[in-house]
Amino acid sequence: MLDQNLIKMYETSFRRNREIPALTDFFKKETFSYFEMAVEIAKIHLLFEECRIKKGDKIALIGRNNPRWCISYIATITYGAVIVPILQDFTPNDVHHIINHSESQLLFCGDTFWDSIEESQIENVRAAFPLTDFRCLFERRGTHVGKFQRDILKHFRKRYPHGFTPDDIKYDRVPNDAVVLLNYTSGTTGFSKGVMLTCNNLTGNVQFCIDHNIRLRYSRVLSFLPLAHAYGCTVDMLLSLAVGAHLTLLGKTPSPKILIGAMEEVKPQVVCCVPLILEKICRKQIFPKLGTGFMRIALRLPLIDSKIYAKIRQRLLETFGGQVTQFIVGGAPLNREVEEFLVKIKFPFSVGYGMTECAPLISFTPLPDFKPTSCGMVLKPYMEVRIDSEDPCRTPGEILVRGENVMKGYYKNDKATAEVLDPDGWLHTGDIGTVDPDGTIYIRGRSKTMLLGASGQNIYPEEVEAKLNNFACVNESLVVQRNGKLVALVVPDYEQCDAEGISNGKLRELMEENKKELNSQLAAYEQVSEIVLYPKEFEKTPKKSIKRYLYNT
């Protein structure tokens, strides 16, 4: 158990940074200073008291990223209640299920989400409040929450008759072993499990990032990852508010054009993103230009190619606001070709590894010590790693982790908890990889996605897909096993097809050529027997991983 405590970190941060901007809605241009945020949190605590919320009670939260989303979250955990953030991608039926399964008693939600929620199907919820102004949207018959909210300023002045001051930013003790977050994840079963995360789990993540100066006081942070997902929530929101950074929220994931415009305006220093963003920019904007006749010739000349790469790096950094010192990539594997290119141009990026069950960080190495192709070093001294293999450095095995960040278990699901948490505290991640003696982790694939060849060889479809995704007119791919053979489902890059005048017939011929070239790069047991064109993008989880279970038949 750690000595530090996240709730006490916030108490200190909100007082010290009271005059600094804390939260900004990029589109509405609405900003809360740390002191104004603390005032809103104090009002919500009064509301919780009126609703007879006790420590450990659950509060559900769903909506686009905005300042009041963050305020609702922080108000809940500083009160000692348990926040239940719900991903926007879940269907109404899933939302109803999560609210009921978690036994949530209050709901904070975006207006559009409330329109799809049936009050009759969430009978435990006493009241609901919108993320626009916290007015009462709904209350159970016999309660007076709506009237209390309408008079919230009167109640606030009564509680603080001499005015709310920095000395009033004081939160009750929340023990490190207390559950403060119940995070529901989509899984390969198509049904979600509630991950119980403690104050200690969140503290371990935040303290590691503070130790390594990932965010600093006055840092400018642009957040566009879903905060209901552990990655964006921890590294963008929880960390920023603990150190006094300024968090600008873009709402849901924006188009590249909007994202680049926001980068130019905010000028962030450290950017957290998923691989898809960097991969799209490289494939769409950079790689095509490098394939022109002049560029091909220039890149063969040693002195000239270094100058070209330096210009490309500078142009990329200017695209992202011009002041980025580090890109932290996580949530999914980074395409190998894209990674090799980023290394070649000396682009400032590092790759981390985590999962919701670790809130989420397992491994990360900041620049300049990051080793390309790895996903960083295990979070010493907070975490330790073990590979279930006789030769962990060379022979891949399941990655097992243990330490401060590992969850308490799955809510109301002892069976699922026992399947991943052994008696010695090791979390079986389901990922396959190797580890260097210094704790640097290299991931090969998922144990659940690993396929067996005809002679029992282990086949990691992600590795085949990473190669195939680099071929002409391939937007994304998915390798599955059918009748004992490997089949690649390919979503074509129709923009490239149109630009190069490739008809449907020529596209099929091109895919045959792609298949031959791909197989020349693979071992015999990894050979793809057929490429099947798929008409639309594959369905994905919020962290942009393909929902493989939908395509296995």
Image (spheres, rainbow, N blue to C red):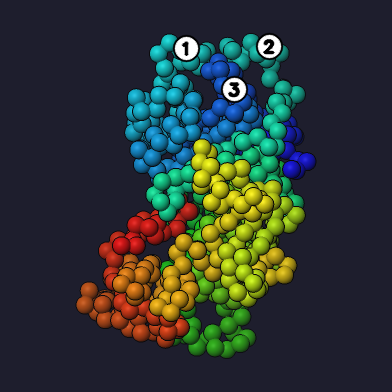
Q: Nearer the viewer, residue 43 or 120?
A: 120
Q: Residue at x 23, y 75 (%)?
A: 503
Residue 373: where, in percent of width, then height? 59, 71
Q: Are marks 1 and 3 in contact (CB under 8 Å)?
A: no
Task: Write down the quadrant of residue 381 in the picture.
Answer: bottom right
Which quarter of the rendered picture does the C terminus lie within? bottom left
Which secondary structure lies at badge 1? loop
Q: Which residue is mark 3?
A: 54
Q: Which mark is residue 161?
A: 2
Residue 457: where, in percent of width, then height? 47, 77
Which circle's residue, 2 or 3, is located before the other in the chain? 3
In the rendered structure, which amino acid carries the disc numbered 2?
Pro
One can see residue 10 in this view: no
Q: Residue at x 45, y 82 (%)?
A: 522
Which quarter of the rendered picture does the N terminus lie within? top right
In the rendered structure, which amino acid carries the disc numbered 3?
Lys
